[in-house]
Image (tube, rainbow, N blue to C red):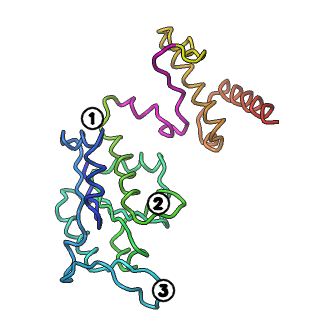
Amino acid sequence: MRFDVLTLFPDMLETVFNESIIGRARKKGIIEINAVNLRDYSKDRHKRVDDYPYGGGCGMVMMAPPVIDAIEDRKRSFENEPLVVYMSPKGRVLSQELVNELSEREGFIILCGHYEGIDERIMEHIDLEISAGDYVLTGGELPAAILVDSVSRTVKGVLAEEEGFKGESHYNGLLEYPQYTRPEEYNGKRVPEVLLSGHHKNIEKWRREMSLFETAKKRPDLLKKAEMTADEKKKVTAFKRRLSRKSK
């Protein structure tokens, strides 16, 4: 899988992409990430890529020529047609559901916005707008890093095991179950006995129930889409009742 990230701050992204799991996957050649400097496509002698907005207003707007030239140039270097993504507060909010959809793609060109946004004529070259959330940031670099990280984790070989991401929060629409490590007892609190039993079927059942309970407690809205057996629904309902009584 390949990601070309169009940015004004390539060094900022390289710092992130060279570390930890993503950095190791890059070195192994499992994923390819290119932080592309948009200023390289500017024909201005000062390498400017922004200008004042027509109609007035504060701030600057990213110009169409260098951005479109960068998109089209990078497109030509892909074997298959890449998905062109613009990190934008107007876009579809990034979720695990969207990440799973994007994991079917082989290549991406990701545009990081900055200043007061981009010239509207650039939008003709954008396939999808994605937002990292309903809040304001100074640029698209951090959201782009989040997108690359979340999609890269689904690529075979990036994580040690496929289960490494399938059991995590949001992958299956639920929050992850509680995790424990050594020591078995700390400050009077012990690791649940089932996790020490070695009985894999019971452990799997416990983790499923804890995942449902964690979701009911912290993100009950996610349960609306969750697939549950009749028995699980009863347990979740009983758990919600106990939570309600405790809060009174």
Q: Could you give the CA–CA distance between mark 1 and mark 3, rounded to whole angstroms? A: 48 Å
Q: Look at the numbered discs 1 and 3 and tell me whether their residues touch, using CB distance below 8 Å.
A: no
Which tag is nearer the camera, tag 1 or tag 3? Answer: 3
Is 166 contained in the magenta span? Answer: yes
Residue 194 percent location from the top left of the image: 55, 12
Q: What residue type is labelled 2?
A: Ser
Q: How far apart are marks 2 and 1 (CA)?
A: 27 Å
For residue 100, which numbered disc appears in the image?
none
- Does residue 160 appear left or right of residue 235 in this picture? left
> Outermost residue, bottom direction?
55
Write the start and end of the magenta stretch as one range. Answer: 162-184
Q: Residue at left 74%, top 32%?
A: 243
Residue wearing tag 2: 131
Q: Which residue is drawn at 48% across and 15% down?
A: 183
Q: Earlier in the sequence, mark 2 or mark 1?
A: 2
Could you tell me residue 151's position as x and y percent?
36, 47
**Which comes before the other along the chain, label 1 or label 3?**
3
Q: Give the main secondary structure, helix, strand or loop, of the magenta stretch.
A: loop
Indicate the amino acid at tag 1: Gly
The mark that comes first in sequence, 2 or 3, is 3
Question: Which label sits on residue 157?
Answer: 1
Q: Looking at the picture, which amino acid does disc 3 mark? A: Gly
State the SS at label 1.
loop
| Quarter location, residue 69 | bottom left
Taking the image as shown, residue 5 lies to the left or right of residue 215, namely: left
